[in-house]
Image (cartoon, helix red, strand yellow):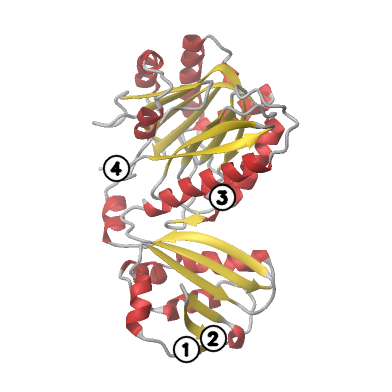
């Protein structure tokens, strides 16, 4: 998959991980306008701290993104910040730009200082390997426990011109709204000001990366960058509706890939909660259901044990009358007005055995609505996380 005009990328092995590529590089040949959304975890990793400051200093301009896997460089204090700064300095030297134009991202084990010497020594190789088709190498270099890379593309019309979006992401565990252990890099040839990019990215993230959950944990490194090269040459005052549509679609596609790749996941629960007193209460119910180990293990077994779903909603803090609650799996009603509906168990089991399991809970209390995607929870999740550092 070729990147949009104005971008090059590469992926190489720096030796942070034992066998796999672990260093990715994205370069905007003539610079790019940039926007970003970061984790809300209070323990923010060094790359998050530095990238936030860089975007503020430049007013939303960037030349490159350096991303590594295998070390989160989070909760590492001054030593971790200094290591990240040395990487930034070296990248700026190689790309002949200011240090504040280099954005950083890391993923991996928390509490370990970045082995910046390995990265600095490998950056020349990453620069040499830059190409318009380098998205594939990049997509492999950012993985941790992911089964495979996550890449998506979309097209849009902006000011009468046809443009492109390409996104690369990683994430499989530590996934929950605000955001998750995920990194996302979206590139477009559109000409948009940083403020417009930020608004568009926030809107897209709120309906994609902020509505997914694998295990209820939110990481210290979560970052989504959106870079615009301007090579499309469109009028910057053009209607952004189709660009927003394409960005929303691309981010939702990547978000679904992350949940489907949830560590050991076999299926995805596509949960919609309606009829809540407010959007906040809809989210309370949705998140309680999506993160319930009992619900998630039943999902793993393809068991339509709907009592667990309602029990989770009941403890969520959302206010409703149990006499008005309804639950539907696909098109099959399971509960109506708080009472079980007569149905054939095998029909429900077929729905719960799908790769996508659509569930709809209507609380019957108002107009609040929330949607969340959540993976099942099985033996492989425990195995992967019990010896993650081994």
Disc nearer the start of the sequence (2/4): 2
The residue nearer to you, when weighing 33 against 80, is 33
Residue 85, horizontal then vertical, whole percent: 51, 21
Determine the residue positioned at 54% across, 55% down.
Answer: 211
Front disc: 2 or 3: 2
Task: Tell me whether the residue at label 1 lies in contact with that at label 2, contact meaning CB atoms closer than 8 angstroms.
Answer: yes
Q: Examine the rendering and report whether any part of residue 196 can be seen.
A: yes
* Mark 2 nearby-residue class (10 Å; few <14, some 14–19, many ≥20): some
Tell me the residue that label 3 is attached to.
Answer: 178
Side of 133 relative to 244 (left or right): left
Mark 2 vs mark 4, CA separation in Å: 47 Å
Tell me the residue that label 2 is attached to.
Answer: 336
Mark 2 vs mark 3, CA separation in Å: 33 Å
Tell me the residue that label 1 is attached to.
Answer: 341
Mark 1 vs mark 2, CA separation in Å: 6 Å
Task: Tell me whether the residue at label 1 lies in contact with that at label 4, contact meaning CB atoms closer than 8 angstroms.
Answer: no
Determine the residue positioned at 38% across, 79% down.
Answer: 305
Residue 302, horizontal then vertical, whole percent: 32, 71
Q: Secondary structure at mark 1?
A: loop
Side of 326 relative to 215 (left or right): right
Is 143 drawn above or below residue 65 in the view shown? Answer: below
């Amino acid at each position: 998959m070729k990147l949009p005009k104005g971008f090059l990328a590469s992926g190489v092995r720096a030796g942070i991980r034992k066998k796999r590529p672990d260093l990715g590089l994205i370069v905007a040949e003539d610079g790019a306008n940039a926007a970003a959304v970061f984790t809300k975890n209070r323990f923010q990793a060094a790359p998050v701290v530095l990238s936030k400051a860089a975007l503020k200093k430049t007013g939303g301009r960037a030349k490159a993104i350096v991303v590594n896997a295998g070390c989160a460089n989070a909760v590492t204090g001054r030593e971790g910040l200094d290591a990240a700064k040395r990487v930034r300095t070296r990248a700026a030297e190689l790309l002949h730009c200011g240090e504040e134009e280099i954005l950083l991202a890391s993923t991996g084990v928390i509490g370990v200082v970045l082995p910046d010497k390995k990265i600095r020594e490998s950056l020349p190789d990453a620069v040499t390997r830059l190409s318009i088709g380098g998205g594939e190498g990049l997509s492999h270099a950012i993985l941790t426990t992911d089964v495979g890379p996550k890449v998506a593309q979309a097209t849009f019309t902006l000011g009468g011109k046809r443009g492109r979006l390409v996104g690369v992401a990683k994430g499989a565990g530590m996934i929950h709204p605000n955001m998750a252990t995920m990194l996302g890099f979206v590139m477009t040839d559109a000409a948009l000001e940083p403020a417009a990019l930020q608004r568009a990215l926030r809107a897209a993230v709120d309906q994609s990366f902020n509505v997914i959950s694998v295990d209820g944990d939110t990481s210290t490194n979560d970052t989504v960058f959106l870079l615009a090269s301007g090579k499309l040459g469109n009028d910057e005052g053009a209607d952004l509706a189709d660009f927003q549509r394409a960005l929303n679609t691309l981010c939702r596609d990547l978000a679904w890939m992350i949940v489907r790749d949830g560590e050991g996941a076999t299926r995805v629960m596509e949960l919609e909660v309606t009829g809540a007193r407010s959007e906040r209460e809809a989210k309370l119910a949705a998140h309680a259901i999506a993160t319930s180990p009992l619900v998630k293990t039943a999902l793993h077994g393809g068991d339509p044990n709907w009592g667990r779903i309602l029990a989770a909603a009941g403890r969520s803090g959302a206010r409703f009358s149990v006499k008005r609650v309804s639950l539907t799996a696909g098109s099959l009603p399971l509960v109506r007005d708080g009472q079980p509906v007569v149905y054939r168990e095998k029909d429900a089991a077929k729905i719960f055995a799908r790769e996508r399991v659509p569930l709809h809970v209507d609380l019957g209390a108002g107009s609040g609505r929330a949607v969340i995607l959540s993976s099942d929870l099985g033996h492989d999740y425990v195995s992967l996380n019990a010896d993650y550092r081994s």
